[in-house]
Amino acid sequence: MRKHPRVGILIDGLRKNGCNVEEINQPLLFSTAQRVEILKKPWKVFGFGWNLLHLWKSLSEQVHAWMKKNDKPDAVLVGYMGHFDVLLAHHVFKGVPIILDHLIFAGDTAKDCGARGSKAKLLKVLD
């Protein structure tokens, strides 16, 4: 599922240049507005974390099923807004180059939304 046009452009470009592209995706179901709201209401991070863990479990199962049928990929592209998914990809695809399409930095977004102190520093570390 391509929610952001940027991901589609990258996938189409890779395919047009002869790359075999397999898509494994599980949407987070947290909008950008909801992510920004977590900065203002930190207790909501628990719901976000719970949702993320369930999605990671599902993604991990899909990846392991794919890996049983296929050779190790040459590279893994983690699409836009993949700040957390890149961590899972690094864990699941050991020894495979991980490419993160990092359009917007989480720390900069937090700063633009008025986050200061430890919240902004944490997101800057995530970047």
Image (cartoon, rainbow, N blue to C red):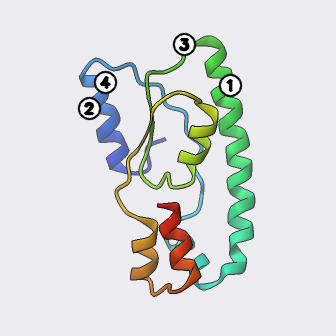
21 left or right of 29 in image: left
Q: Secondary structure at mark 4?
A: helix
Camera-near label (2 vs 1) is 1
Q: Spatial distance from mark 3 to mark 2, Cα to Cα?
A: 22 Å
**CB atoms of marks 3 and 2 within 8 Å:** no
**N-terminal label among 3 and 1:** 1
Q: Secondary structure at mark 1?
A: helix
Which amino acid, by three-letter code, is at mark 3? Asp
Residue 19, x across and y down, in percent: 33, 20
Q: Spatial distance from mark 2 to mark 1, Cα to Cα?
A: 26 Å
Q: Spatial distance from mark 3 to mark 1, Cα to Cα?
A: 11 Å
Classify mark 3: residues with Cα within 10 Å, few (<14), some (14-19) or many (20+).
Answer: few
Camera-near label (3 vs 2) is 3
**N-terminal label among 3 and 2:** 2
Residue 15's label in the rendered image is: 4
Q: Secondary structure at mark 2?
A: helix
Residue 68, x across and y down, in percent: 66, 15
Residue at image mark 3: 71
49 left or right of 85 in image: right
**Residue at point 58% right, 81% down?**
118
Which amino acid, by three-letter code, is at mark 1? His
**Residue at point 68% right, 22% down?**
65
Q: Quadrant of residue 35?
A: bottom right
Classify mark 2: residues with Cα within 10 Å, few (<14), some (14-19) or many (20+).
Answer: few
Residue at image mark 1: 64
Vertical position of residue 106 compared to residue 26: above or below: below
**CB atoms of marks 4 and 2 within 8 Å:** yes
